Image (cartoon, rainbow, N blue to C red):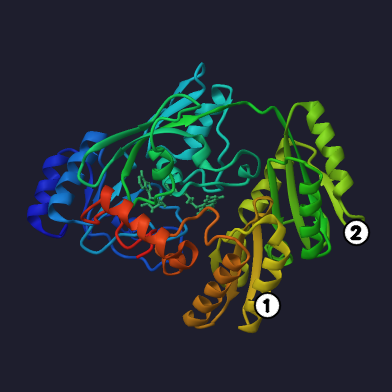
């Protein structure tokens, strides 16, 4: 195990001149947690390899010694997947970072897995191109972490999640073998798509060291509309109308009455309107198409609503930010909070919300729903002061059951990690769970990569 001096020395031989954090050393405490509610665990050893070759040699050693390895990007995960395992190694990708190599002609970018998403987006935009996935954690998360969790974000309602933008990967298997998957073309039907399999594998199949991303042309301008609505039911009806009208927003976000009230109580004077709920809708494209989409949107807005079109890029950014800070504001204003991210078919959204509210009410828990409603992906937050952990866990499980019963999923974008694993067999069923374990054992026969996470038993 990594507290063993001989193992430490062997790892030091592989990484002679880089940081290696052991207990008691400054900075190691940051690696005990991620951004989930999972219990922190002190790391025994954190390594910062600088190349695919160093990752490969580290994994060869860990494979031979059966040492658990937890791959870690920016630690912004919401499912507990990057939290250390006692006696294991935290393999940080922080040093696998660099300026993306952008190829304008093939419209792609190649970038180290540890590069922060914000840095990737900045370079892509400077090249006049567009990389759509936009989790609100862009300053802290890494592109490798985004691939490992198949991250999404508001723009995915139009553009789809990270998986739609991964052309290829360099990844290191548990025994140190280096895999280069994918291609530099938009289309390929050569063999099984291992790039897609590794995307969303949450560090259980391989350590991703390098990513080739598909880029789009710059989509042009944007128009953002804040719609203040009298009830959640009206908000969900408006979402259904927007879908029925065939509009294609690049952002369709919901804030329920608890979320809007929390922003107001927090002193946010930027919240437009005075009704209880809100939808934030954004379009992109040429001026002609923006005008047409805006006209289409206005036709879907009920008379009981108040609507506001952003007057400047600053106002647009402020409204996006309001949605982005809702999670933090709810936690500040309401005390303790447990957050889930289920997704249901759009046609079942109203039923899902009604049933989840009923479950929570039966246990005396208030819930706040906000999020990527245009994708059917809701962040459902249980708000409580002193409810026992067992009650919160019970309500969370009932919410998962509601989602599954309505044809939905346990996780729209945050992944399974540690926190939802106990429910995964309910979503997958025995055959699928068995097949996935078989794939895991082919990639990682000693079960050293993020063992006990993301996959069903
Ligand atoms: C404020 C906030 C807003 C957020 N908003 C969104 C959102 O809108 N949409 C969304 O999808 N998510 C969102 N998230 C969740 C989180 O940012 C994403 O899951 C993100 O993709 C995690 O990236 P990371 O680099 O921080 O990964 P980590 O947290 O470090 O790791 C996450 C998982 O990926 C694995 N992993 C990380 N890097 C690698 C690698 N190179 N190779 C193999 N496995 C790896 C880890 O083992 C772990 O299982 C948000 C989080 C916060 C805190």
Image disc number at residue 304:
2
Secondary structure under badge 1? helix
Q: Residue at x 77, y 61 (%)?
A: 277
| Mark in the foreground, 1 or 2 | 1
Q: Residue furthest left?
A: 6
Label 2 neighbourhood size at 10 Å, few (<14), some (14-19), many (20+)? few
What is the quadrant of the N terminus in the image?
Answer: bottom left
Q: Is residue 110 above or below residue 354?
A: above
Give how far across and how far down residue 30 sits, in percent. 35, 56
Q: Is residue 247 left or right of residue 329?
A: right
* Viewer-side residue, 214 vs 50: 214
Give how far across and how far down residue 223 sits, in percent. 76, 37
Q: Residue furthest right?
A: 303
Q: Is residue 343 left or right of residue 72?
A: right
Q: Residue at x 87, y 53 (%)?
A: 306
Q: Which residue is mark 1?
A: 358
Q: Earlier in the sequence, mark 1 or mark 2?
A: 2
Q: Is residue 27 visible?
A: no
Image disc number at residue 423:
none
The CA distance from mark 1 to mark 2 is 26 Å
């Amino acid at each position: 195990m990594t507290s063993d001096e001989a193992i430490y020395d062997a790892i030091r031989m592989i990484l002679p001149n880089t940081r290696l954090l052991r207990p008691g050393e400054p900075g190691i405490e940051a690696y005990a947690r991620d951004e989930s509610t999972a219990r922190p665990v002190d790391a025994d050893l954190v390594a910062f390899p600088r190349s695919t070759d160093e990752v490969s040699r580290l994994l060869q050693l860990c494979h031979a010694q059966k040492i658990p390895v937890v791959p870690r990007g920016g630690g912004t995960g919401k499912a507990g997947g990057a939290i250390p395992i006692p006696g294991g190694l935290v393999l940080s990708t922080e040093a696998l970072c660099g300026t993306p190599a952008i190829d304008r002609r093939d419209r792609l970018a190649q970038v180290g897995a540890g590069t922060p998403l914000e840095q990737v987006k900045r370079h892509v935009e400077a090249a006049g191109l567009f990389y759509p996935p936009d989790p609100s954690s862009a300053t802290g998360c890494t592109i490798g972490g985004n691939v490992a969790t198949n991250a999404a974000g508001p723009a995915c309602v139009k553009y789809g999640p990270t998986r739609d933008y991964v052309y290829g990967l360099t990844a290191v298997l548990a025994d140190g073998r280096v895999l280069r998957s994918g291609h530099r073309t938009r289309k390929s039907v050569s063999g099984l798509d291992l790039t897609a399999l590794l995307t969303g594998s949450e560090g259980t199949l391989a350590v991703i060291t390098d990513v080739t991303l598909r880029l789009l042309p710059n989509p042009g301008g944007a128009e953002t509309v804040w719609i203040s609505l009298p009830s959640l039911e009206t908000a969900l009806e408006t979402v259904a109308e927007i879908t029925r009208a065939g509009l294609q927003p690049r952002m369709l976000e919901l804030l329920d009455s608890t979320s809007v009230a929390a922003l107001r109580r927090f002193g946010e004077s930027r919240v437009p309107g005075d009704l209880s709920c809100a939808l934030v809708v954004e379009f992109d494209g040429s001026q002609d198409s923006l005008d047409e989409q805006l006209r289409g949107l206005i036709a879907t807005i009920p008379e009981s609503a108040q609507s506001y079109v952003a007057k400047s890029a600053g106002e647009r950014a402020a409204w996006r930010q309001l949605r982005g800070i809702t999670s933090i504001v709810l936690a500040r204003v309401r005390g303790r909070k447990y957050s889930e991210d289920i997704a249901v078919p759009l046609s079942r959204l109203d039923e899902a919300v009604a049933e989840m509210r009923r479950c929570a009410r039966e246990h005396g828990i208030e819930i706040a729903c906000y999020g990527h409603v245009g994708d059917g992906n809701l962040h459902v937050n249980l708000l409580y002061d002193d409810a026992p952990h067992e009650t919160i866990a019970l309500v969370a499980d009932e919410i998962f059951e509601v989602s599954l019963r309505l044809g939905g999923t346990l996780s729209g974008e945050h992944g399974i990690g540690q926190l939802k694993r106990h429910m995964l067999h309910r979503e997958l069923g025995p055959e699928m769970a068995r097949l996935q374990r078989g794939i895991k054992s082919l990639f990682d026969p000693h079960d050293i990569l993020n063992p006990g996470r993301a996959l069903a038993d």
